[in-house]
Image (tube, coloured by chain):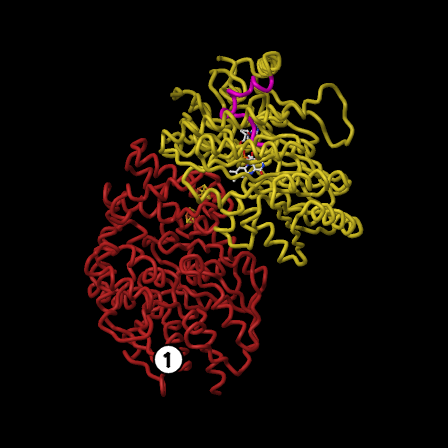
Amino acid sequence: MLSRKIIDELTAVLGKENVLTEKEELACYSFDATADMPQSMPDVFVTPTCTEEVQKVVEIASKNKVPVYTRGSGTNLSGGTIPLKNGIVMGMVKMNKILEIDAENLNAVVQPGVIIQDLNDAVAKHGLIYPPDPGTVKTATMGGSVAECSGGLRGLKYGVTKDYVMGLEVVLANGKVMRCGGKTVKNVTAYDMVKLFVGSEGTLGIITEIIVKLIPAPETRKSFLASFKSLDDAANSITGIIASKVIPATLEIMDNATIKTVENYAHVGLPTDAEAILLIEVDGLPEVVAKEAQAVEKVCKENNGQLKVAETDEERDNLWTARRAALPALAQVSPTTVLEDATVPRSEIPKMLKALQEIAGKYDLKIGTFGHAGDGNLHPTILTDERNKEEMERVHKAVDEIFDAALKLGGTLSGEHGIGMAKMKYLENEFKEAGVEALRSIKKALDPENILNPGKIIDLEG
Amino acid sequence: MSYYDLLQNINEEIIKCMKCGNCQAVCPIYKETKGESGVARGKIQMAKALLEGRLEYNEKLAELFSLCLTCKACADNCPCGVRPDKIILAVRAALAREKGLHPLKRRIFSVLAKPKVFRLGMNAGSVFQGLGLKRVKGKNLAHPRFPIGLDMRRVIRPLASQSLISELPRINKPQNPQFKVAFFTGCMLNYLYTDAGKAVVDVLNKNGVEVVIPEAQHCCGIPTFVHGDMSTSKKIAKYNIDVFMKEDFDAIITHCGTCIGAWVEHYPEFLADDPEYAEKANKLANKAYDFSQFLIEKVGLKRPEVSLDVKVTYHDPCHLVRGVGVATQPREILKAMPGVELAEMKKPDRCCGSAGSFSLTHYEMSSKIRDKKTEDILSVNPDAVITSCGACRMQLEDGLYQTGADIPVKHLAMLLQEAYQKEGK
Ligand SMILES: Cc1cc2nc3c(=O)[nH]c(=O)nc-3n(C[C@H](O)[C@H](O)[C@H](O)COP(=O)(O)OP(=O)(O)OC[C@H]3O[C@@H](n4cnc5c(N)ncnc54)[C@H](O)[C@@H]3O)c2cc1C
Ligand code: SF4
Ligand code: SF4
């Protein structure tokens, strides 16, 4: 429990309406979107409304050695916002102003609590887009997505969050404010601190302002659904498309288990006998789109794919409804949905999909896999029930093996959901001892008291 | 046993929630408070904590659970098919059981439990309300004169001088009727918006439908249900079922989002394990229709011949659009009317913030939510707003009044009535 004195200090800075201490309210900040995690209650929940208030909160925390867990919308999938060691949860949702849209220089300046979709709606008027689009665009905050380096459906062609963050304002663990990066396209002044803070999951500093890059909205687009009787054919199409020098905006895959579940749920006419389907979209200038579309068709046909082209906007929407239905459909099958994001080099996708099928068989689990085939980022989704202790044990073993398999294929633990507390124990498998030591040194240098999101990514105490 | 009688039974619904937070995108309360306790995800986790003994029944919990419009936007948008509205109402019922109702609510509901006393009070109320309400010049709206549990700023619709049921005959029969329906007026149409009630009868008659108005009918009971008073809600449900079982008709007709929800969804679920009433409730549920639904699906609308020359926008009542899935039927009617231009506002199905008594108990929050709605309405610059629910209508009238706009809000039946009346001239 925090002392009355600390609560009073916080209240003096933020005002009563921004400091919550009743346990009913606090219970609402003891979890995030991650399945199968312990819940832990904060001692207090605060909502600063400006950088100075964030600084003051951090100063109070640092003086009293109290943990600060920064929270956006709490939609992350790695336990990143769970206040494992109690203390302060700091919600950034009230710092939600779009400070500037500089259409001429193709950038925007936002506060961390801005919801991604709200930024997109605001820049659409200028014919611009902010491409990173995680499944949670309508709920996730800019701060949270920068701190997670979120990806999304368009990663293959447009990259992920880190490719769009140009500058940051960050409150450090000692309460001081630093700025890094800026509005210029080129910037090599000293270390690339922007990239360091992107994906740092609230463990190195608190992001209070973000300068992002915007790009012109593509003029046209064309979508396809290709179904395959074998995984290899699907995989060869993925590599074939890219080998023919086409980079689709989206290149998504669904395995048979997912196809069946989606069809059963959404009735959108998916081929339930297909081993895999690919959902492909090319976009850009009309002439380029036409040419790329031809190439996509050719490759899919050569690899025995059945091709369906979305001719109208409505058909296109239907196609993407099917993709968006993947997670909901799987989630409805059973009470608990364990969603991973192990990622492998594109060429290893068929091996990874086969490994997942084997793991599902070995542990007698239902695993549906879908994901961003174009960038090798798969979402094996285990359908289970957290009340079934025996099954959960098998789930944990399966998860261990999934990460093993991904690393063996030259992949990584997390493509876009982050490490948080969910994947900490695997970190050394990928980073090895020297790597973990380097991570620890960075954490120590920036947060010597270990007050920023302690117990996540790297634990200084253990 | 229903989860409204035993909270444990809502567990299956709770466990379905994957905590994705998608409900944040649509919850009107979350949009205002930005607090996790405002949105379905937070409330579901509080319910879970309550069942696991990590939280207890207390004032704070009651306060937090009162902050929900039961607008079902979360349910509609949930990838896992969770029904947060049911979880929230189940907790409210458990709170009422464990902690008792607020004394003021208890007094009001005890009157509601007695149909005759309530009717007497409401009829007398129309005579005495002049003492408490100050009329707005030129409009049938009024400000409260004293802080009688109402915010002084708001305008409300005064009680009609005579209730619909006492004003209209019991049987309203056109020549050669094709159908016979029983009209469940609901309180709003019976005591406040009698203009809409009369329009329903008129329009149905014009469409060859005989309308019977059972005089003993009572409030639908949902106001007591949303505050967790299950015993009164069940009493009222049974009472109304008894009244309507005595009649002979093809359908029960309502023109109110809440009333239709009561008949179609709630009576059957309240009484699911009642040996005497379960079957009756289901039988009547299958016969209950919203006014527009019945005209479109059963009767086939008699298209008005004369053009009205108005631009309207339609507001979807939450319980009509998400509760029973009626959204296309009212629009089909509007589109079939010559000279009626339907200018859709942005998000016509977003909650107006009324949520019945929520607008009384949380006027400030309710007004903020309502202001978003009025803004959307004004942006399409209509001559009139059309809706299908008295509570929404009152909320929108207040909202438009506060902006100074002179745009009337009407029940759908009233617009049809105008068109048919013009034909007669
Ligand atoms: C259904 C579903 C689909 C998803 N789809 C995708 C997807 O396609 N791609 C993808 O990449 N992710 C996806 N996610 C994960 C998640 O939505 C993203 O990581 C999202 O960007 C998190 O944003 P948030 O505002 O909810 O952050 P939070 O969950 O609140 O926080 C995330 C992390 O950032 C830290 N943080 C938050 N704000 C700040 C700040 N201002 N300064 C410093 N640190 C901060 C927190 O401490 C935490 O560690 C999905 C999640 C769900 C539930
Ligand atoms: S209620 Fe539905 S939308 Fe909200 S968090 Fe739970 S699963 Fe997600
Ligand atoms: S019913 Fe409406 S107000 Fe209540 S939690 Fe759901 S979206 Fe929010």
Depth order, front residue of A115/A287: A287
Q: Which chain is yellow?
A: A
Q: Is residue A214 above or below residue A226?
A: above
What residue span does the magenta drawing correspond to? A416-431
The total number of labels drawn is 1
User: Which of these two is toward me, B36 or A376?
Assistant: A376
Rendered location of residue A312, percent (x, y):
66, 58
Residue at x 56% of width, y 49% of height = A322
Give the colour chain B carries in the figure: red
**Magenta segment: does it hold B210?**
no
Residue B130 visible in image: no
Write the residue at 34% across / 58% down.
B265
**Image side of residue B62 versus residue B107, left or right:** right
Find ligand 1 in the image and state its quadrant: top right
Q: Which residue is mark 1?
A: B209
* Residue at image coords 41%, 64%: B389
The image position of residue A206, as x and y in percent, is 58, 26
Residue type at numbered disc 1: Val
Q: Quadrant of the N terminus of chain A?
A: top left
Give the vertical position of A16 relative to B312 (above or below).
above
**Residue at coordinates 46% horizontally, 47% vertically from top-left?**
B78
Q: Could you say which is closer to the camera, residue B299 or residue A196?
A: B299
Asked if ligand 3 lies within 8 A of label 1, the reply is no
Q: Is residue A97 above or below residue B205?
A: above
